[in-house]
Amino acid sequence: MAFLSTTLRIFKNSTLHISRNPWHSIAAFLVLSLTLFLIAVFILVMMGMNVILSYFESQPQVTAFFRNESSEAEISNIKEKLEQTGEVAKIEYISKEEALVRFKEQNKDEPVLFEMVTAGMLPASLEVSATDIIYLPHLADILTHENAVEEVAFHQDVVETLQKWTNAIRIGGLVIGAIFIAASILIVLVTISMNIATRAEEIEIMRLVGASTSYIRWPFILEGILYGVISGILGVGAIFLLFPQISPPLSEFLAGIPVFPVPNAIFIKLLAVEIALGIFVGVLGSTIAVARKLKA
């Protein structure tokens, strides 16, 4: 019972610290909420980029178009040669008839073209996906030197560009996130230090009447935790409110790529991560402030 009573008093003191210095507290909430909001955006962007990258990596990255006179035996030998390299994740043969079906699907809004194009006018092809993009040049080179192959379409640049963008966003996000986390720790430190300073006389009286060091310190530590928890909820809440506005145009832009819809479980996990990170920042900032200002 005594423990519960003490805990409630500590919590009450923490909320009093926040309410007595509203402008300092608002500044701490704003900076920490903005930090956690940006980190949440970064996490979602990185998840989206990884989905997009995986999608393009799973698509045919090298396509070989065969001459009309190429035989089934020649095509079969080329398939075996590619599979024997151990560098192929997937290989698919597209016949002339299948190529015509695809052509009609891609041009379904232009029926006039259907009458002009026949299966005989379209080449058969092999669509090849590599286990890693580093193998693409080798696979493309094998196909280029085959007499049965008329043309090779090689799309390595798309995946490489996406990888570069993903790495750049990852590095940039980490740098920006680190800067904002440092700023948040600093603002929590300053806010709680000022709260300690304004209560210096009250703290001295508490010491004189025998209050323990932990009883004096814990309200300030809990204040930092409250900053972190509330800011984490605000940061993810802002994402949750903005997401329905930005997802339709993004979904249209990324048509065919399975990025949307984002499962609700992702937002729940994101909220847990944001609150945990907010608590870490709040506790670290408040602990430093308490250690500097409340030396035993």
Image (cartoon, rainbow, N blue to C red):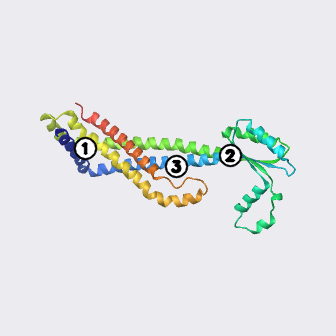
Q: Hey, which quadrant is residue 252 in on the image?
A: bottom right
With 50 as the anchor, is 132 left or right in this view? right
Earlier-in-chain disc, 1 versus 2:
2
Q: Is residue 206 left or right of residue 30?
A: left
Residue 122 pos. (x, y %): 80, 56
Which dot, 1 or 2, sits closer to the camera?
Answer: 2
Which residue bears the numbered disc 2?
157
Which quadrant is home to the C terminus? top left
- Which x, y percent locates residue 270? 43, 47
Give the left or right position of residue 288, taking residue 80 as reference.
left
Q: Which of 37/189 is in front? A: 37
Residue at the far right in the pictured view = 69
Gap in angstroms between the C-alphas marked 3 and 1? 37 Å
- State how far apart marks 2 and 3 are (Cα): 21 Å
Q: Give the farthest residue toward the top.
A: 296
Name the amino acid, label 1: Asn
Q: Residue at x 79, y 52 (%)?
A: 124
Q: Position of residue 222 (x, y in %)?
A: 28, 42
Label 2 residue SS: helix
In the displayed orientation, state which residue is furthest to the bottom: 112
Q: Amino acid at mark 3?
A: Val
Other-residue count near label 2 (Cα within 10 Å), few / some / many at <14 / 14–19 / ≥20: few
Question: Which label lies toward us, 3 or 1?
Answer: 3
Could you tell whether 86 is left or right of 71 in the image? left
Crowd tier of the residue under label 1, counting other residues whose Cα lies within 10 Å: few below 14, some 14–19, many 20 or above: some
Q: Are marks 2 and 3 in contact (CB under 8 Å)?
A: no
Question: Residue 45's mark?
Answer: 3
Look at the numbered disc 1 and give the secondary structure of its residue.
helix
